[in-house]
């Protein structure tokens, strides 16, 4: 479960990094270029990663027995709002017949997307800290 959360966080972060580069290209449309094809793929992957993310995080809290659970649950309510807001913006961009660099630049500037990224950085760090003892146990057992 923690690996899935980490993979989802990575997908959104990779999308954002790609979007920064795409915005800098000054393209009027996503048609006719390799990065134009890729922009839709990255956005679709991010949308998929965001769908149900908070629910999976909440299940991981139970599965991993993380405490204090109420603190995790409270934060995941924030993550859910930010993910839903960002997903709405991403889906709006995907619904456009042409995705220009300017449109992506505006998406990148969205406070919703920036809040989500900050949430994901926090979740990613928490997941890495939770997953580390499990990895160390496996490594130690293999010796």
Image (cartoon, rainbow, N blue to C red):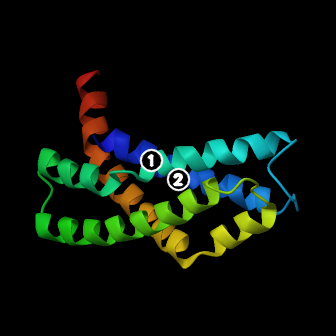
Q: Position of residue 72 (x, y in %)?
A: 21, 65
Instruction: Work out whether mark 1 precedes mark 2 in sequence or the reverse, and give the earlier one.
Output: 2
Q: Say the numbered circle drawn on residue 49.
A: 1
Q: Which structural element holds mark 2?
A: helix
Say which quadrant the C terminus sits in.
top left
Q: Position of residue 46 (x, y in %)?
A: 52, 50
Say which quadrant the N terminus sits in.
top left
Instruction: Identify the residue at image location x=35%, y=70%.
Output: 81
Instruction: Identify the residue at image location x=12%, y=63%.
Output: 69
The residue to which callout 2 is attached is 12
Q: Say the numbered circle drawn on residue 8.
A: none
Q: Is residue 33 above or below residue 16?
A: above
Q: Which structural element holds mark 1?
A: helix
Instruction: Identify the residue at image location x=86%, y=42%.
Output: 33
**Real-space Cα distance between discs 1 and 2?**
7 Å
Report whether 24 appears left or right of 65.
right
Residue at the limit of the structure toward the bottom, as seen here = 111
Q: Are marks 1 and 2 in contact (CB under 8 Å)?
A: yes
Residue at the limit of the structure toward the top, as seen here = 142
Mark 2: give few (<14), some (14-19) or many (20+) Cα within 10 Å. many
Disc tally is: 2
Report whether 100 appears left or right of 18.
right
Report whether 61 appears left or right of 44.
left
Whether residue 68 can be seen here: no
Whether residue 47 can be seen here: yes
Q: Nearer the viewer, residue 141 or 104?
A: 104
Instruction: Identify the residue at image location x=26%, y=44%.
Output: 133
Mark 1: give few (<14), some (14-19) or many (20+) Cα within 10 Å. many
Q: Position of residue 35 (x, y in %)?
A: 79, 45
Q: Position of residue 28 (x, y in %)?
A: 87, 59
């Amino acid at each position: 479960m923690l690996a899935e959360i980490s993979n989802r966080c990575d997908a959104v972060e990779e999308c954002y990094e790609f979007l920064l580069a795409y915005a800098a290209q000054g393209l009027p449309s996503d048609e006719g270029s390799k990065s134009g094809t890729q922009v839709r793929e990255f956005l679709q992957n991010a949308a998929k990663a965001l769908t149900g993310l908070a629910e999976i995080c909440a299940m991981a809290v139970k599965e991993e027995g993380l405490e204090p659970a109420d603190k995790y649950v409270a934060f995941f309510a924030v993550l859910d709002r930010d993910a839903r807001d960002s997903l709405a913006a991403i889906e709006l961009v995907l619904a456009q017949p042409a995705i220009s660099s300017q449109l992506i630049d505006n998406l990148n500037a969205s406070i919703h997307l920036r809040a989500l990224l900050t949430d994901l950085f926090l979740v990613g760090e928490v997941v890495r800290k939770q997953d580390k003892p499990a990895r160390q146990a496996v490594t130690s057992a293999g010796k």
